Image: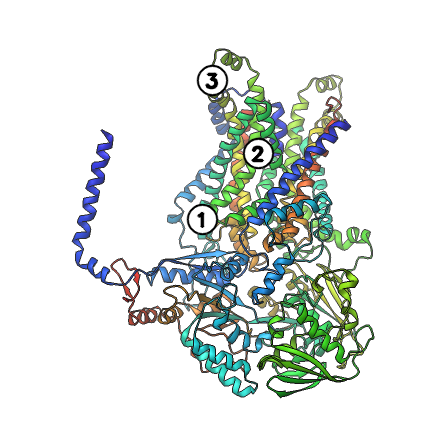
């Protein structure tokens, strides 16, 4: 008996429902004439612990896309490891995501942000083109800037590439964070700061002038070091120290121009041949002289062992030869514009006499496995001890070719940003290595003995699409999305005004003075405008307010 | 007795084996690329492959598991992916830091708890007792991390009396192990985290001492002591407290075991370089060897404390014998 | 807390089933602390249920002042009783939203743990033999696992969500209840009426359900009260360490945000209220539980 009752109710309900849809017949037909409903998708983002700004921005975008644009989006905050796994994985299991590129100094050269992350050859699983942007016209320009050895011509190409990116909007930059640091102005003077690098750049310890008798510079950091082996070091935190212990042929000046370091000079003989003259009379910290042999060995050794951190800069090298006892010639397989700015400015010079027979002596299979407990280089500072998790100590190298005013520096580890702030406050640290969190900037400004320095970052955080999937393959759709991001709130509220506004395809910004194209326009936060763009491109909203694809 | 200990140790090893297996599996099943936090995402896929290969993560789970177990038998937990050195050597110092903080807090909590509990039993039913119970329960209810933050706010920020983080001041160089742990600088750093941990621990010995005291006070020999005309104070401390102490002390050893995992929070708030903090970081970084090692060491520690509790009980209470 | 109960279980005396509730209610009325606790718990429940109505604002809303500036880390005012966060969000509304999370976690985890623990405890204690040793071995294993770290890994494994936090906490906590219930069952099984039931041919299920269960309910209930607190503390701790559900506002999460953003040393109005809420709720549960404990364990009754 009961069963029948239920069945009746069910039947009645069905009729009512059918009746209802019949009532609105007029509209229903028009819904059918429209395209498919825009497929539901997810927006992968960071956990608030990893990047709170991205997390907040993603939530805000998700709300707008759902409530204002009638899409079906779920914002998914996930662990950084999982995020990387998803966007680099073989399954290509992602639609949209927020992530960022950090502003490593070698990325001042535009090759990374123009070529490596947008060239179609990298649009494969595991490749860096996680946007899956594929454009022949763009590829052509990106390749051309890479092989153009003339800087001003190259600049034009890079400018053109930026305009294309702004129009195509394969990704939308959300913001670039400012790097804010402070130093103790009672103890030290003449502090060099560098865009994209901040205060712990390679020049600061070499240029700084002590004001008191205590000439030891104490740098406070929250980043522990994994290793001091230059063939294993994989993070900027290690390299900030290693590049002071090991010397390089070229160093980028504070305005990012290549400057002679261990190289006295260099000459671009032709597009694929570069001669480097090695400075005379240099020695390693153990007293052995630095020779052309060591230089050739360093490059060959890194190439032979495929050192991941540098591999993309080393790939263009065909061979390294010694032409006389002060000259090394690099033969490239093809013209490679960033060779001096990136390759020569990145690769450390290793003492051949230590590394040459290392594998046999230590019985290891890869030089990355070597502990390198006592790193010997020829850089401005001599290694003086490392207590894992506590500090790294260095002394100034007296025989270095540049005069250094301090006695050395200590890289002191603290557990959190809070502790670093207190160390500056209590004068037990002189500068902070990593940028302040917004709360501490205000605090630092209240102390007269602290000078707060602010520089823009060349790295950036962005929203990206998987252009292999609908509707992200549509330029109009991406352009519309660029108008749904509240750029001002990101900067003013989340970043306390310490940052640069983002924009479509904006991979280079004001921080990168030479390569940034100031004529590129940035979209404004304007939801109406976004709807307009969508309407123009044929998108419609159905009777439920759901966004529908253009009719094919 | 020795047979009992041997049997216990044997069953401990089996438990450890099972826990190691569970932990091994858990980390392998965890989503996410273990190389993501070790290498910059921009390095070419081949180079990333090479790292995965070198870490042995390409082998089948079975091969990885056999290797893991073989090494474990030799007390080798493998090299930490992140620190690139043996996991055991990373954890050695951290374990010391954790244990010192833990013991300091336990001593403080038990010192106050035992006397406080005896006093409460003596004054049972009084307003003082109710207040003491209320305070103990408030202490037990307050999350340690919150008490820690409040303590830092009051004692380090507002009053500026004590350092707020870490184990020693920056640049402080200990000349030897003794100085590392017994210098004035270290002791100053130890005060706040110890007190905060002790506040959380306090309720256990306090309430337990009170309850066992109440039970003991009802027993015959106490009545006899009273009948002999001894003062209440002497009855309380010379006769009752002595007998009530036994279960309280043994519970202490058990408690250390279960509390050691909760230490994470205090270590996090006070930047104390201990085992718990390291374990959380290792799990976050997908540093399997380090996370596995810290889990297993903690589990072993807990089990050893449980065994100690039982043996202590047998030693202190002659009525119990283990065969 | 577990150990306190654990040791005491040796001395458990038979709780008179009839009138346990009666005794408890009498106790509650007599014991002023317990009464206060019960009233406070009711209040928290009301806030949890009607949170949406009580909270003045949406937790996500970013408030701006008349000139359009974000109200960043502002002290308590008539508009914002507990002040604002660094993104201009209302702390008071967040604390109210956190009440519901705490209640859900505490309630659900306690029910799950008690059900699982009691079942396993009864089965283990009643059947004895290899079933008992196997189950107790498993309990031993769970006792050796460090709690907070394991929950963190488990939650990361299953994706951080409120339900997974509840599940992970429950998975690790049933052991205490199981052990206690088992020892209670052991002493109950020796009693004549159980033996009589056996002789009269009652099925195992019937004996366990009809005769044993009523005798372990009081202790299971008491344990459930402690589990509520245990679960709430665990959730708060996990959220504070940043492993909680990012989409569920919880008291631990509020403190977490203040801490990672570097405001834990200035904005007392941001840190203090969620902590005080935790303390108030947990203390209330303890007070009520104590009153229940005196019923279950007559030795503790005031003489």
Label 3 or label 2, whichever lies nearer to me, is 3
Name the residue located 42 percent from the left edge and 44 percent from the top edge: C47
Q: Which mark is residue A73?
A: none
Residue B252 seen in the figure? no
Query: Which is nearer the eye, C105 or B95?
Result: B95
What is the basis of the colouring in this image? rainbow
Q: Which badge, 3 or 1, comes first in the chain's sequence?
A: 1
Q: Which badge, 3 or 2, comes first in the chain's sequence?
A: 2
Query: Which is nearer the eye, A18 or A511?
Result: A18
* Chain letter for the residue marked with disc 1 in the picture: C
Q: Few, some or many C-alpha atoms within 10 Å of disc 3 (few <14, some 14-19, many ≥20)?
A: few
* Residue B52 image position (x, y, % from top left): 61, 58
Eyeballing the image, is A383 above or below C303?
Answer: below
Query: Are the residues at dot 3 and dot 1 in contact (C-beta closer than 8 Å)?
Result: no
Label 3 element class: loop
* Residue B235 image position (x, y, % from top left): 73, 24
* Residue A498 image position (x, y, % from top left): 53, 71
Residue occupied by mark 1: C96
Label 3 or label 1, whichever lies nearer to me, is 3
Residue occupied by mark 2: C175
Q: Quadrant of residue C6?
A: top right
Residue occupied by mark 3: C203
Eyeballing the image, is B220 above or below B291?
Answer: above
* Chain letter for the residue marked with disc 2 in the picture: C
Tell me the distance, in whole angstroms, between the alpha carbons under discs 3 and 1. Answer: 50 Å
Residue B142 seen in the figure? yes
Position of the N terminus of chain B by quadrant: top right
């Amino acid at each position: 008996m009961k069963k029948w009752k239920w069945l009746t109710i069910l039947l009645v309900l069905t009729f009512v429902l059918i009746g209802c849809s019949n009532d609105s017949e007029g509209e229903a037909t028009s819904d059918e004439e429209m395209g498919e409903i825009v497929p539901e998708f997810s927006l992968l983002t960071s956990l608030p612990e990893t990047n709170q700004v991205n997390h907040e921005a993603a939530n805000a975008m998700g709300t707008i896309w759902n409530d204002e644009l009638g899409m079906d989006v779920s914002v998914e905050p996930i662990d950084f490891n999982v995020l990387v796994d998803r966007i680099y994985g073989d399954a290509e299991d992602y639609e949209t995501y927020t992530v960022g590129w950090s502003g490593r100094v070698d990325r001042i050269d535009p090759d990374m942000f123009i070529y490596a992350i947008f060239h179609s050859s990298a649009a494969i699983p595991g490749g860096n083109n996680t946007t899956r942007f594929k454009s022949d016209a763009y590829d052509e320009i990106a390749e051309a800037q890479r092989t153009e050895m003339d800087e001003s011509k190259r600049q034009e190409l890079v400018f053109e590439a930026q305009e294309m990116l702004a129009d195509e909007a394969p990704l939308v930059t959300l913001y670039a964070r400012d790097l804010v640091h402070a130093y103790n102005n009672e103890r030290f003077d003449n502090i060099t700061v560098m865009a994209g690098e901040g205060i712990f750049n390679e020049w600061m310890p070499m240029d700084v002038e002590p004001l008191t008798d205590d000439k030891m510079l104490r740098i406070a950091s929250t980043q522990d070091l994994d290793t001091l082996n230059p063939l294993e070091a994989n993070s900027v935190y290690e390299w900030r120290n290693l590049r002071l212990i090991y010397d390089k042929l070229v160093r980028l000046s504070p305005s990012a121009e290549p400057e002679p370091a261990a190289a006295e000079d260099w000459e671009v003989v032709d597009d694929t041949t570069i001669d480097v003259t090695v400075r005379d009379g240099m020695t390693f910290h153990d007293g052995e002289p630095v020779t052309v042999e060591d230089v050739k060995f360093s490059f060959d050794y890194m190439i032979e062992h495929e050192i991941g951190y540098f591999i993309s800069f080393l790939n263009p090298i065909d061979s390294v030869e010694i032409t006389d006892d002060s000259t090394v010639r690099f033969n490239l397989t093809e013209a490679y514009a960033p060779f001096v700015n990136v390759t020569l400015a990145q690769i450390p010079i290793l003492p051949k006499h230590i590394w040459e027979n290392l594998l046999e002596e230590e019985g290891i299979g890869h030089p990355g496995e070597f502990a390198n407990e006592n790193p010997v280089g020829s850089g401005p500072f001599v290694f003086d001890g490392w207590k894992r998790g506590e500090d790294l100590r260095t002394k100034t190298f007296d025989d270095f070719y540049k005069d250094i005013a301090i006695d050395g520096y200590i890289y002191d580890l603290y557990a959190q940003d809070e502790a670093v702030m207190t160390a500056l406050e209590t004068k037990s640290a002189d500068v902070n290595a990593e940028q302040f969190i917004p709360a501490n900037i205000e605090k630092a400004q209240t102390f007269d003995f602290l000078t707060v320095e602010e520089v823009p970052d060349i790295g950036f955080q962005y929203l990206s699409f998987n252009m292999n999937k609908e509707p992200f393959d549509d330029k109009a759709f991406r352009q519309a999305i660029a108008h749904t991001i509240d750029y001002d709130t990101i900067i003013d509220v989340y970043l306390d005004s310490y940052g640069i506004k983002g924009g479509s395809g904006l991979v280079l910004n004001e921080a990168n003075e030479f390569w940034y194209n100031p004529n590129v326009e940035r979209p404004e936060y304007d939801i109406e405008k976004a709807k307009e763009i969508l309407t123009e491109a044929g998108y419609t909203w159905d009777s439920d307010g759901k966004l529908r694809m253009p009719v094919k | 007795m020795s047979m009992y200990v041997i049997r216990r140790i044997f069953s401990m090893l089996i438990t450890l084996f099972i826990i190691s297996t569970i932990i091994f599996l858990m980390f392998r099943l965890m989503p996410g690329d273990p190389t993501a936090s070790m290498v910059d995402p921009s390095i070419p896929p081949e180079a990333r492959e090479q790292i995965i290969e070198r870490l042995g993560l390409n082998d089948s789970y079975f091969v990885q598991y056999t290797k893991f177990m073989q090494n474990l038998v030799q007390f080798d937990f493998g090299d930490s992916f992140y620190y690139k050195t043996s996991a055991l050597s990373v954890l050695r110092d951290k374990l010391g830091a954790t244990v010192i903080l833990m013991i300091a807090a336990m001593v403080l909590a038990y010192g106050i708890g035992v006397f406080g509990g005896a006093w409460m039993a003596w004054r049972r039913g009084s307003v003082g007792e109710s207040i003491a119970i209320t305070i103990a329960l408030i202490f037990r209810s307050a999350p340690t991390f919150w008490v820690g933050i409040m303590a830092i706010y009051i004692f380090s920020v507002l009053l500026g009396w004590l350092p707020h983080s870490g184990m020693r001041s920056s640049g402080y160089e200990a000349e030897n192990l003794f100085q590392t742990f017994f210098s004035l600088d270290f002791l100053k750093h130890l005060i706040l985290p110890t007190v905060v941990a002790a506040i959380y621990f306090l309720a256990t010995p306090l309430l337990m001492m009170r309850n066992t005291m109440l039970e003991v006070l009802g027993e015959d020999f106490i009545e006899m002591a009273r009948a002999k005309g001894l003062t209440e104070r002497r009855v309380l401390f010379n006769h009752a407290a002595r007998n009530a102490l036994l279960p309280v002390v043994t519970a202490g050893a058990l408690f250390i075991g279960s509390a050691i995992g909760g230490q994470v929070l205090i270590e996090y708030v006070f930047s104390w370089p201990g085992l718990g903090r390291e374990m959380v970081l290792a799990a976050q970084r997908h540093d399997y060897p380090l996370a596995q090692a810290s889990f297993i060491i903690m589990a072993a520690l807990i089990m050893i404390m449980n065994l100690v509790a039982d043996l202590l009980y047998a030693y202190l209470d002659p009525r119990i014998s283990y065969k | 807390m577990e150990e306190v109960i654990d040791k005491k279980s040796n001395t458990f005396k038979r709780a008179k089933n009839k009138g346990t509730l009666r005794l408890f209610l009498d106790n509650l009325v007599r014991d002023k602390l317990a009464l206060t606790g019960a009233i406070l718990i009711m209040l928290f429940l009301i806030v949890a249920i009607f949170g949406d109505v009580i909270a003045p604002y949406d937790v996500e809303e970013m408030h701006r002042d008349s000139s359009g500036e974000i109200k960043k880390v502002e002290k308590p005012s008539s508009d914002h009783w507990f002040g604002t966060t660094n993104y201009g969000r209302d702390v008071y509304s967040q604390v109210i939203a956190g009440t519901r999370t705490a209640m859900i976690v505490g309630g659900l985890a306690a029910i799950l743990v008690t059900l699982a623990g009691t079942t396993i405890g009864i089965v283990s204690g009643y059947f004895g033999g290899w079933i008992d040793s196997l189950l107790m071995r498993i309990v031993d294993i769970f006792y050796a696992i460090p709690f907070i770290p394991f929950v963190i890994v488990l939650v990361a494994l299953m994706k951080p969500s409120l339900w997974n936090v509840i599940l992970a906490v429950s998975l690790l906590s049933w052991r205490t209840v199981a052990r206690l219930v088992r020892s209670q069952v052991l002493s109950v099984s020796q009693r004549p009426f159980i033996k009589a039931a056996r002789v009269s041919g009652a099925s195992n299920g019937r004996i366990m359900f009809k005769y044993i269960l009523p005798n372990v309910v009081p202790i299971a209930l008491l344990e459930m009260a402690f589990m509520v607190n245990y679960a709430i503390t665990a959730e708060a701790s996990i959220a504070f360490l940043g492993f909680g559900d990012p989409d569920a506002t919880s008291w631990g999460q509020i403190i977490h945000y203040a801490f990672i953003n570097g405001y834990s040393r200035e904005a007392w109005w941001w840190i203090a209220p969620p902590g005080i809420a935790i303390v108030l709720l947990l203390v209330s549960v303890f007070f009520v539980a104590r009153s229940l404990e005196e019923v279950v364990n007559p030795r503790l009754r005031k003489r």
